[in-house]
């Protein structure tokens, strides 16, 4: 059966998202059709718009942080049935790349994708879906292994946040560079991802969690989400301040520093605030020509003498089938804060307004309710 729906779509480069009618083909083998309940508005959707589609073919259905219920399953899908609540994962392991073949799906090179099934109703043009999801839509078709079943008691307007911002931040502290109990941690950038790193560090029993930002509102959020100290990088040198706060007679520094801004100098700062043998992790998206300059030989903070490591976090190195239900469970047990991550609930037609608010920097997450 062909279904009809509505979606926020980029029709061409340089234009705002438009709310248009769509039609959806039935899900193919191994695919599912999801009726969206909620979708978070993540910075990556804005980036796709600002970069003129970022290489994707127009028209593009935006959105990749969605939760909903299964409406129809394709041939061969036995682990899901209509009515099941799911969160959509944009990085379900491909099961074919070298990492998957050696049994390391957290480091999968790519991700499972559905065949294009969504059409612009006006002319039938096939739509691309941001990160294989396309959740700014009343309905979407995704790979069945990318639809992760949620516990029945998990509210879907909170569950959608798990899909990107939360799993990326918490996963950085749990999977990419796992914090050990008692470790000292710094987090640079306190938006949705940075706040989730703070939550992850707390879940891993860090002894200190030092939040760094230039926005006092975000530093207050950081405190609310578990930071033990905050540093306003507009007022003081964050590297020096973190070393002072952690002074232990051994030059201070943190065992783990996470950069969640996408600003190259913040990755340099993360490396420079490490204690001996510490690990910095860069999370934010760089632009194609972004570069960092890391000193090797300085006796105090040089990468060589300080034995510093630099990790890269992609989506929290998540294994969605394992991590999404775990994060839902932590929420239901009151150990993971999601309610306060939702700054505002909006309708599909408010997507552009939500983008503007995001650019102003005073929103953790806007969540579209369908
Ligand atoms: Zn995202
Ligand atoms: Zn793979």
Image: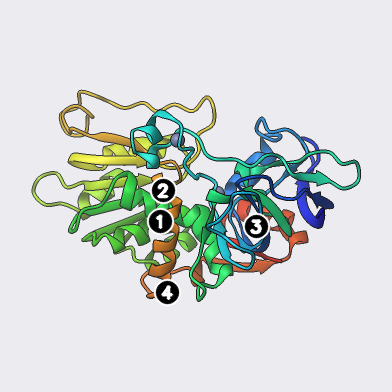
If the image is split into quadrants, where does the N terminus sit? bottom right
Element on which disc 3 rests: helix
Element on which disc 1 rests: helix
Are discs 4 and 2 less than 8 Å apart at CB? Answer: no
Residue occupied by mark 4: 332
Looking at the image, residue 249 lies above or below residue 182: above
Quadrant of the rendered image holding ligand 2: top left
At a point 52% along the width and 73% down the height, the residue shown is: 152
Q: CA distance from mark 3 to mark 1?
A: 30 Å
Q: CA distance from mark 2 to mark 3?
A: 28 Å
Are discs 3 and 4 less than 8 Å apart at CB? Answer: no
Q: Position of residue 252 (x, y in %)?
A: 16, 47
Q: Position of residue 195 (x, y in %)?
A: 42, 59
Quadrant of the image occupied by residue 328: bottom left
User: Reading the chain from its start, which is encountered first: label 3 or label 1?
Assistant: 1
Residue occupied by mark 1: 323
Q: Which mark is residue 357?
A: 3
User: Reading the chain from its start, which is encountered first: label 3 or label 4?
Assistant: 4
Element on which disc 4 rests: helix
User: Reading the chain from its start, which is encountered first: label 2 or label 1?
Assistant: 2
């Amino acid at each position: 059966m062909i279904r009809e729906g509505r979606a926020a779509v980029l029709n061409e480069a340089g234009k705002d998202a438009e709310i248009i009618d769509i039609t959806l083909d039935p899900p193919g083998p191994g695919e599912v059709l999801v009726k969206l309940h909620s979708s978070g508005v993540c910075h990556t959707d804005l980036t796709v718009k600002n970069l003129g589609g970022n290489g994707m073919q127009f028209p593009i259905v935006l959105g990749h942080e969605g939760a909903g219920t299964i409406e129809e399953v394709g041939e061969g899908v036995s682990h899901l049935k209509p009515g099941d609540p799911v969160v959509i994962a944009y990085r379900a392991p491909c099961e074919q790349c070298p990492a998957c073949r050696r049994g390391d799906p957290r480091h999968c090179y790519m991700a499972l994708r559905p065949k294009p099934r969504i059409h612009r109703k006006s002319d039938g043009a096939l739509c691309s879906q941001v990160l294989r999801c396309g959740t700014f839509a009343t309905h979407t078709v995704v790979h069945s292994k990318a639809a992760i079943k949620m516990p029945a008691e998990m509210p879907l307007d909170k569950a959608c946040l798990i899909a990107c911002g939360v799993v990326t931040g918490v996963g950085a502290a749990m999977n990419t560079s796992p914090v050990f109990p008692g470790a000292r941690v710094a987090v640079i950038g306190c938006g949705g991802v940075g706040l989730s790193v703070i939550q992850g560090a707390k879940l891993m029993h860090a002894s200190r969690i030092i939040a760094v930002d230039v926005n006092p509102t975000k530093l207050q959020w950081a405190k609310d989400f578990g930071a033990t100290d905050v540093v306003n990088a507009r007022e003081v040198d964050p590297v020096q301040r973190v070393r002072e706060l952690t002074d232990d007679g051994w030059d201070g520094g943190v065992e783990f520093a996470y950069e969640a801004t996408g600003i190259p100098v913040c990755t340099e700062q993360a490396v420079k605030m490490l204690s001996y043998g510490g690990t910095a992790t860069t999370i934010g998206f760089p632009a194609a020509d972004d570069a960092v300059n890391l000193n090797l030989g300085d006796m105090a903070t040089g990468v060589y003498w300080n034995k510093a490591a630099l990790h890269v976090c992609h989506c929290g190195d998540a294994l969605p089938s394992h991590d999404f239900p775990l994060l839902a469970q932590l929420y239901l047990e009151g150990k993971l804060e999601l309610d306060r991550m939702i700054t505002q609930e909006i309708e599909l037609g408010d997507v552009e307004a939500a983008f503007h608010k995001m650019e102003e920097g005073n929103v953790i997450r806007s969540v579209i309710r369908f």
